[in-house]
Image: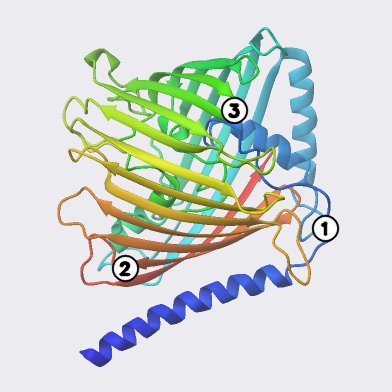
């Protein structure tokens, strides 16, 4: 038994070292001319990069980045035609549209008996904003919407793959499970105000996941993949539904945010806000030592949920009422802001959230140096530890490394490796590997 234990430890170490070495070599040998473009997202926004407001900004930014591994895209004609059509539509109606498509392929080194070891799934978003009030002014008012679709192809999607195949509580992907119906309006709200006005608010169907404890550098569609690594689910986050968010921009380095939402919200219907069960949160956002204008906020979030009316788990809620806190420290590590470090820790009480405790450390390096350089590429690494609230779960760890690069103009490819330690709901397995390929385009 002792020899077998040593063999297992050696196998784990070897797989981790091999994966890291492979990604480093890959980043060094990808070659393309460098340009002066900046691939880093504008990190100063309040919300998640998949929030409609920020997603539209990302689509605008990505459309200006033409360099890639292969200079000619098979979708070039479609991107050019769509860009021109969007510009004409905006000039005529003040309605701006954007589209994003993401496909993820994922495989496991092993799985529980009878469960799949590989799967694929796609997500598409049609996002838009209609500028209706005080256009061009700090107090501009506009309506945002996000039509989101998720589907697989008769396979197991990567999100249920990690949960069912490995018995993982951290899970191996966030946001890649099919919808029924395939398309839903994930967000539909009125937004008014800006940092220049000193205030802003939104009312309507909102997604609390996309506001609380977020980072512009953490998204399952552009950077890291696992559920616990990308979502702050030590917060008992309600699903998309009726709610309100208000922000007070204290100064250019501090913002106070308040959020109230229907605890019974369900992204597939109207929820039940009339039941009176609410989720409430307050969040202080602050920049500690910004080194560039794109520096992101560190955040401290305090929250309370009344629980769901039937005690049923929905999204990040397990059903009971409870409360908790989560903090995120985000810092630019270099003067040019290309290296980013992020630390997160959250704790929930009263068994109210998906995780009783959640801790993670993320590192990202935009435009990594090497003998040759592919502009607008990105290397990331993260370690996540989670203690699930569910009875019988053991503590689980996840190490992920990824390399993202533009393979064609407007088309990004990501190669990802995950090392899963002690899957929470499979005590017979101490380690598994997860391999992923993600393709994303937007226009």
Residue at the image point whose x is 27% and y is 18% from the top: 272
Q: Earlier in the sequence, mark 1 or mark 3?
A: 1
Displayed quadrant of residue 90: top right
Badge 2 element: loop
**In the picture, which quadrant includes the C terminus?**
top right
Residue at the image point whose x is 20% and y is 34% from the top: 319
**Distance between the alpha carbons at the discs numbered 2 and 3:** 39 Å
Q: Pinpoint residue 322: horizontal percent, then vertical percent.
A: 21, 32
**Distance between the alpha carbons at the discs numbered 1 and 3:** 29 Å
**Distance between the alpha carbons at the discs numbered 1 and 2:** 42 Å
Residue at the image point whose x is 77% and y is 72% from the top: 371
Is residue 117 found left or right of 263 in the rendered image? Answer: right
Q: Can the viewer see residue 218?
A: no
In contact (CB < 8 Å): disc 2 and disc 3: no
In contact (CB < 8 Å): disc 1 and disc 3: no
Badge 3 element: helix
Q: 10 Å neighbourhood of mark 2: few (<14), some, or many (≥20)? A: many
Which residue is farthest front? Answer: 289
Q: Earlier in the sequence, mark 1 or mark 2?
A: 1
Would you place residue 111 above or below residue 234 in this image? below
Q: Earlier in the sequence, mark 2 or mark 3?
A: 3
**Which residue occupies the foreground of this view, 440 or 350?**
350
Is residue 3 found left or right of 85 in the rendered image? Answer: left
Q: 10 Å neighbourhood of mark 3: few (<14), some, or many (≥20)? A: many
Q: Which residue is mark 2?
A: 111
Q: Which residue is mark 3?
A: 53
Q: Which residue is mark 1?
A: 34
Q: Pinpoint residue 389: horizontal percent, then vertical percent.
A: 21, 47
Would you place residue 80 above or below residue 377 in this image? above
* Nearer mark to the viewer, of 2 and 3: 3
* Nearer mark to the viewer, of 1 and 2: 1
């Amino acid at each position: 038994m002792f020899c077998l234990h040593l063999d297992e430890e050696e196998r784990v170490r070897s797989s981790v070292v091999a994966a890291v070495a492979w990604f480093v070599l890959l980043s060094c040998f990808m070659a393309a001319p460098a340009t002066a473009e900046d691939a880093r997202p504008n990190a100063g926004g309040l919300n998640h990069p998949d929030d409609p407001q920020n997603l539209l900004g990302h689509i605008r930014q990505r459309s200006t980045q033409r360099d890639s591994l292969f200079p000619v895209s098979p979708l070039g004609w479609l991107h050019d035609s769509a860009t021109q059509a969007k510009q004409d539509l905006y000039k005529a109606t003040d309605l701006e549209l954007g589209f994003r498509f993401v496909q993820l392929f994922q495989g496991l080194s092993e799985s529980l008996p009878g469960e799949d070891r590989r799967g694929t799934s796609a997500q598409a978003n049609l996002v838009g904003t209609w500028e209706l009030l005080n256009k061009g002014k700090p107090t501009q008012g506009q309506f945002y919407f996000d039509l989101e679709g998720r589907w697989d192809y008769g396979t197991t999607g990567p999100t249920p793959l990690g949960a069912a195949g490995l018995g993982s509580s951290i899970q191996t992907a966030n946001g890649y499970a099919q919808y029924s119906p395939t398309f839903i309006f994930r967000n539909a709200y009125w937004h008014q105000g800006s940092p220049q006005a000193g205030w802003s608010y939104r009312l309507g169907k909102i997604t609390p996941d996309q506001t609380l404890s977020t980072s512009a550098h953490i998204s399952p569609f552009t950077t890291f993949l696992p559920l616990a690594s990308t979502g702050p689910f030590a917060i008992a986050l309600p699903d998309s539904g009726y709610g309100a968010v208000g922000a007070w921009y204290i100064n250019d380095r501090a913002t106070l945010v308040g959020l109230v939402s229907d605890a019974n919200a369900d992204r597939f219907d109207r929820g039940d806000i009339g039941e009176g069960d609410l989720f409430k949160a307050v969040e202080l956002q602050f920049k500690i030592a910004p080194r560039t204008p794109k520096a992101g906020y560190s955040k401290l979030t305090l929250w309370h949920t009344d629980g769901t009316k039937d005690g049923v788990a929905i999204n990040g809620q397990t059903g009971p009422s409870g409360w908790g806190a989560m903090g995120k420290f985000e810092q630019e590590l270099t003067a040019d802001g290309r290296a980013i470090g992020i630390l997160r820790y959250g704790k929930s009480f009263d068994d109210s959230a998906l995780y009783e405790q959640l801790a993670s450390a993320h590192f990202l390096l935009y435009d990594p140096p090497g003998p040759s350089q592919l502009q607008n590429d990105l290397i990331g690494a993260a370690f996540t530890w989670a203690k699930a609230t569910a009875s019988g779960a053991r503590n689980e760890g996840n190490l992920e490394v990824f390399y993202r690069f533009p393979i064609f103009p407007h088309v990004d490819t990501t190669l990802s490796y995950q090392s899963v330690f002690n899957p929470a709901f499979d005590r017979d397995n101490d380690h598994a590997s997860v391999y992923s390929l993600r393709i994303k385009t937007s226009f």
